[in-house]
Amino acid sequence: MFDLTWLAGHANTTYTHHPTPITLTPKSPSPSSPKAKPSFSTLISSAVPPCRLNPLLFNGHLQTMYTAVKDAGPAIHYKRQIFESTHPIYPGQFTVDFVVPPPSAPSTTPTSPTLPERTTPFSASEFAALASDDDDTPMLVALHGLTGGSHEVYLREVLAPLVAAGWAACVVNARGCALSAITTPQLFNSRSTWDVRQLIQHLARVFPRRPLFAVGFSLGANILTNYVGEEGAECKLKAAVAVSNPWNLEVCNVVMKRSFVGLEVYMRAMGKNMMGLYERHKEQILKNEGVDEERVRGCKYLFEFDRVIQAPTWGYATEGSYYRDAQSVDAVLAIKIPFLAINAEDDPASRIPHPIHKNTISCIDAIPYEEFKQNPYTVLCTTNWGGHLSWFQFGGGRWFATAVSAFLMKMHDDIDLNVPADAPANAKKGPTKKFPIFDPSNRRLIVPLS
């Protein structure tokens, strides 16, 4: 019998987590059970709304391709601050766009060609005036997807309800993205956690009372997951969300190249976007001795760009070694804060066709289900339908944006964030032996974290 629930827009939602998830302390205990503490998985399932999608976009390809339809999205206004990296090995600049109230009167000043729409620069005095020892406003740090930035509609759809509810927010623009300049030969990469680390350290210092949260989208979700795993129990975030994380980058690369649509639509489109970044920043990029300009000109697909620019820039031998080192699957095991991941099982980046029945889907190898079962601080929410950064609903809007904002507001409004989560005893223990020990964050690119 065929499942026809998609005709009504009903997607199936599944939660994968540890048998004994962390428990959280509510701000207002229940009168009937004053000592009761909700489990993290229960809190998530109560906050996340049912997934109801546009039945006309009935598979992951249609959902994903619909992102190309022009949509103004919510009008979020930003002030941009340029930070100088404090990293001893990777200096240079990165930009952060802070959400600000809309101007009281429409601006007559033409939009700057060096800044995205509705974005103006901070003056030194304006930025310095932000610091406050008393401000306890919840604040969200957002990381965009590949070649994106603070201007992306999917990102603004998450920010809008939170900002309307009184939250502060900012977006870390990956180096070279969102019309930002680069001052060293490196663009961003999928494991470059140092800029978000520096920003969060800065925010914790200038806003010591603000509870900090984070959300990452696609490539930004991979970076955020790596960051939270690297920080472990010392992470300054109260909770984090990863949306459409590709997780296993090597698997995603194989999957994309295996089909005509994956190669000629998705890989080519991403390669074109990366080549646009290259053209904008090639004067700096070509200062890297490992980058061959003639080989770059022949790039059509994302993996070719990663092979001839990203790999030599960062010291990797091949794009495969880059993907294996940068992927965030193992980082899930090191997370020690409340962490929610949202993925669609029909995301074109995660689908593995059956080797015999090539038109059917038999497994989704890129999503780390087993790793989520091992870590009580993490919960994976998957839907059987929704595409990549899509989940378009009938009538407009994206389901994941509602889910993310609802979860974050529930964490802030209902949970006492000053009380550490209770984890199973075996999750609190450190290693009991010297060797062998598996360290999820000890990957092959040797670099100080800050």
Image: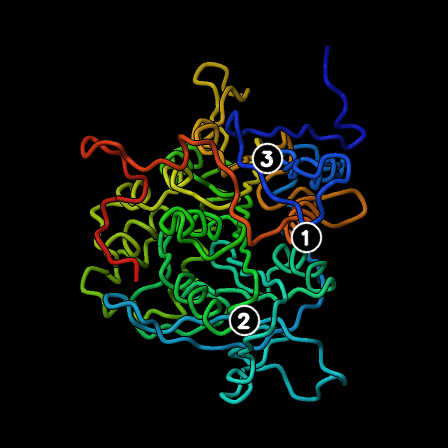
Tell me the quarter of the image containing the N terminus.
Answer: top right
Question: Which type of secondary structure does the marked residue at label 2 adopt?
Answer: strand
Amino acid at dot 3 = Cys
Q: Which mark is residue 97?
A: 2
Amino acid at dot 2 = Asp
Can residue 301 be spotted in the picture? no
Q: How many C-alpha atoms fall within 10 Å of the one at disc 3: few (<14), some, or many (≥20)?
A: many
What residue does disc 3 label?
381
Residue 147 screen position, x and y as percent: 47, 59
Q: Is residue 341 left or right of residue 30?
A: left
What residue does disc 1 label?
409
Q: Residue at x 36, y 46 (%)?
A: 303
Mark earlier in primary sequence (3, 1) = 3
Q: CA distance from mark 3 to mark 1?
A: 17 Å
Question: Which type of secondary structure does the marked residue at label 1 adopt?
Answer: helix
Q: Nearer the viewer, mark 3 or mark 1?
A: 1
Residue 392 screen position, x and y as percent: 70, 44
Q: Is residue 174 above or below residue 435?
A: below
Mark earlier in primary sequence (2, 1) = 2
